[in-house]
Image: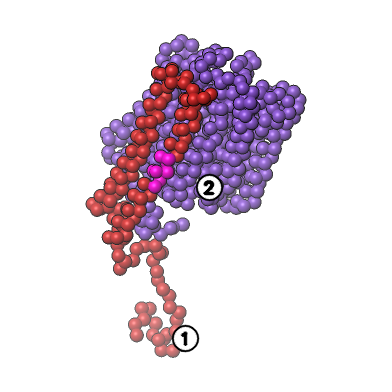
Amino acid sequence: MFDPRGDRTLAEGGPPPKRVRVVSPRRDARRRSERRPDAVELTEQTGLGEIYLTALLRAQLRLSVAILLAVGGILVGLPAFFLLAPGAAAATLGQVPVIWLVAGVAVYPIVLLAARLHVRMAERIERDFTDLMAGR
Amino acid sequence: MNTLTSGWGLTAIILVCVATVAVGALGLRLSRTTSDFYVAGRIVTAGWNASAISGEYLSAASFLGVAGIVYSLGTHMLWLPVGYTLGYLVLLVLVAAPLRRSGAYTIPDFAEARLSSSRLRRIASVLVVGIGWLYLLPQFQGAGLAVQTVTGASPAVGSLIVALVVLVSVAAGGMRSITLVQAMQYWLKLAAIAVPGFVLSWLWLRGGQPLPSVTDPGGPFAGALPAYPMREHPLYATYSTLLALCFGTMGLPHVLVRFYTNPDGRAARRTTVIVIALLGAFYLFPPVLGMLGRVYLPTLPTGTRADSVVLLLPSAITPGTLGDLLSAILAGGAFAAFLSTASGLTVSVAGVIDQDLLSGAINRRLGGDLPRTHSFRLASVVAILVPYAASWLAPGATLADTVGMAFAIAASTLGPLLILGVWWRRLSVIGAAAGLIVGGTLAMGATVATLLGVGRGSGGWLPVLLAQPAAWSMPIGFTTAVLVSLATPRSVPVNAARAMVRLHAPEEVTARVRPPAN
């Protein structure tokens, strides 16, 4: 029997010593045998990780810019329209000014719809990304 | 205004203050450790959190200022509340989820986590404190105005009440109590503006007074009342303000903190959508009150600010008990607005002062003996005292204008920092710092010049450009950050790609790499 301490007396008689397990303090360190998770490639700036990250970033940014342009396009035009066309600013629907219905009421549901659309699409992009990382 | 009004109005104000402190004390019983103190232990659900974000966001400028500015300057100012809401859409699509995933609690935290530079963190801290103070200023002024309108007391009384209540609830309860308080404040504010809004509109419809659409005592409703000078170049001013609101909201000190309370990036997005709905619902009402002001209060007594039109309106429409009651409700709601925004700002500003300025100095002197909660309390005193003192000195810009300046500075500095930090890997430390310094100097310079009255009354472009700087200072700050970053590729942090993964990859993916530590 191999005893690292060379203490022969223990091997011959008396109670066996309590086993001491020596472990690394880095309990969260990756085990060598474990399969290398794909996400590690993401963080370690490997060529593949770079491609994944760029694709994710690009998809999300494209979505964000599209939403901003759509909402911005509507909203950039309106103040100019009402300011440059005094007739439109003074127009009323029944008793209520049209500018009120547009800027005071109708704008808010539009913004809310854009927000909901963005959340749905952004989550879809993330789901696809997660599936991609898990499926490989 | 008769004594009855002052009695009811005062009662409403006292009730709101007592409720705020009481709910704060309730939260205090729940908050135990420093991390509870700061971020509510992250057990807040999306609905509560969205109410809290909205409650904190709807400030004096929203409750009194929007109606005041629509009343005095006309329907073109309807874009102002739209901009206040749009800021959250921009925040949602550009930074909401990544900011939450960054794990940053404050903007300086984000700057340091993303760019690994403590110097950049220091610059961001100074900006956060400056913007926070500028935003606190109109809260104190609005409170003074409300108390003055309701009771006739000196404006100093109202400011002092807000300062004390905020100090007690922030220093005692920290963030958890504040989350409860803020959520309650949103619904309080919505009720306090919606009920008078409906009642007064109904009285107006029944009374059959014509809408001031084309001609009214002061001219077309689209334009300004004669007592308030029409602004030069209104189209530029509108676009510049919208830009400041869109890109400034994400940079406000008290906004990011709330996103940290969400459990993950997805929840942060969903919370923001609810916030947009809640804000939209609220903003239906202030312009209606402004419009009714045009019908019933074609001129205000001399020396009265347009911001107080909301509080004067009920008595003008229906003198007597009903009018007094509605006035009291509005005064209570306005006070809720000052308290909630001021508390949120104070927590954030105090957090930054504590973490980045006070703690280090104190620990060096005392050898680390002072508990964190004590230094946070000390920081909140500093955070309140400075803007409170400034509210005595500052000249009377309208509430919406002062808040607009805070937005413009945020949009020229912290907004670009967040956007570039989230989306652009090649942002360098030097580039980010240059962007903050250039954008900040320009926007703050314009703010100071406006407050000092540079070019006022001269007509032409100069005062307009200075009063609404975002349209030029934000692109300059943004471009500076980009160009300097391109010129200094060596100061791009080595861990930029790792930081970007953390910001953008869904939690399920990053969790596989790193088990949830600490």
Asked whether residue B396 is in view, the answer is: no
Residue B68 lies in quadrant: top right
The residue that label 2 is drawn on is B47
Mark 1, secondary structure of its residue: loop
Amino acid on which the number 1 mark rests in the picture: Pro
Q: Nearer the viewer, residue B69 or B438?
A: B69
* Chain identifier of the residue bearing label 2 in the image: B
Q: Say left or right for B256 vs B503.
A: right
Mark 2, secondary structure of its residue: helix
Amino acid on which the number 2 mark rests in the picture: Gly
> Marks 2 and 1: in contact by CB < 8 Å?
no
Q: Nearer the viewer, residue B307 or B18?
A: B307
- x and y percentages locating residue B272 in the rendered image: 47, 43
Q: Which residues are magenta?
A: A113-120
The residue that label 1 is drawn on is A15
Q: Nearer the viewer, mark 1 or mark 2?
A: 2
Asked whether residue B93 is in view, the answer is: yes
> Where B217 sits versus B435, above or below?
above
Q: Which chain is red?
A: A
Q: Please name the residue shown 43% across and 36% down the image.
A: A110
- x and y percentages locating residue B294 in the rendered image: 58, 20
* Chain identifier of the residue bearing label 1 in the image: A
> Where B449 sits versus B266, above or below?
above
Task: Name the residue furthest top.
Answer: B458
- x and y percentages locating residue B389 in the rendered image: 60, 27
Q: Which chain is purple?
A: B
